[in-house]
Amino acid sequence: MWVVIAAVTLLAGGCAGGSSPSPSLGPSLASASQSVGPSPSPSPTPATVRFALDWTPNTDHTGFYVAQSKGWYRDAGITLKILPYGNTAPEALLAAGQADCGISFQDSLTFAVAAGAPIKSVMAILQHEASAIAVLASSPIQRPSELDGKTYAGFGYPNEAPTIKYVIRADGGKGDFRTVTLDSTAYQALYSKQADFTIPFTAWEGVEAQEKGIALRYFKFTDYGFPDFYQVVLACNDDWLSKNADAARRLVAATVQGFEFADQQPDAAAAILIAENPSVFKDNPRLPLDSQRFITQQHLYVDGSGNVGRQTLEQWTGYSSFLYREGLLTDSKGKPLNAPLDYATLFTNDFLP
């Protein structure tokens, strides 16, 4: 699931994403659950929220399934209606009013808003980049500058090449490489040595490769001066937010509580994710647990202060302005923007608890 730079160009296309015994919840859960979470009125007005996934259930979504399983949405008066995953990007469903909220990404949301989609991020799910350029650990390639002249197994998104060139040039290279667009088979192309490098989602494909005994060497974007970005966010339709502000606050508060649980109790959270989606993980029941542990170890759910959900203008400006400078942001007619977006309109913290 190349969610990194998995921009869903304009409002079409798809984005990829996807155990353990149920452990004890441990003594810290009670205090965590009491300290943060939804604070609804005694009788909150019931609300049904149509929710769009970006892919089949995976650890990007754990907090939603935790909040569902624990009854935190119910307690907040929220019925979360998870829409069946299809080939239509969540941003397109949100823009068309066919979903109220859904999974998105900083790049995908920026592309969509530039094209006129009335949506914004209401919480960060993964606070940091969780993808990286990867080569086989056995490869003679030791640094990004040595990717010049090599073959990249890609996914067809417009921001792939500019991002890779940035990293290569930051390391002293020219940024010249060949690209073969393979989509989900890009990983296998790397593993079988038919390509020299690709960009896996480290918390999923990276974990999966490790489980298979495939050792990878990573070049993280931020290690070469590339701006950090929100890998995964919760986005909602602007009109729905304005008409359902109280329900939105209750939705976000319960969701934050779910992801706090996932951060503090990764084994228990993975067990819930599997229990809520048993058919999804029948072929690899261990992957959700290993992924959940990886996310917690890498502090992907929390910011530098340990907060779940919070976003900053600085981080939204960094990566989204890179997309603008590269000429990748286009309007509803497909023409490059002639002025940058107001990056403050791409997100809000107003609905966080």
Image (cartoon, rainbow, N blue to C red):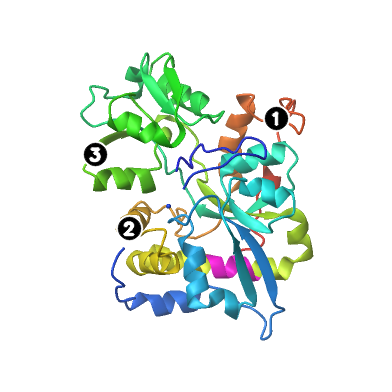
Q: Residue 283: where, in percent of width, then height?
A: 33, 55
Name the kind of residue labelled 1 in the image: Thr
Residue 159 visible in the shown view = yes
User: SS of the residue at dot 3?
Assistant: loop
* Most foreground residue, 287 or 348: 287
| Numbered badge on residue 312 | none
Which residue was labeled with disc 3? 214
> Which three-letter amino acid code belongs to the residue tagged 3?
Ile
Of labels 1 and 2, earlier in sequence is 2
Whole-Å distance between the Cαs marked 1 and 2?
A: 38 Å
For the magenta stretch, what is the residue range?
250-255
Quarter assignment of residue 38? bottom right
Q: Is the C terminus in the top left, top right, bottom left or bottom right quadrant? A: bottom right
> Which residue is labeled 1 in the image?
330
* Residue appearing at x 54%, y 29% in the figure: 159
For the N terminus, which image quadrant? top left
Tell me which numbered mark, 2 or 3, is placed earlier along the sequence: 3
Q: Amino acid at mark 2?
A: Arg
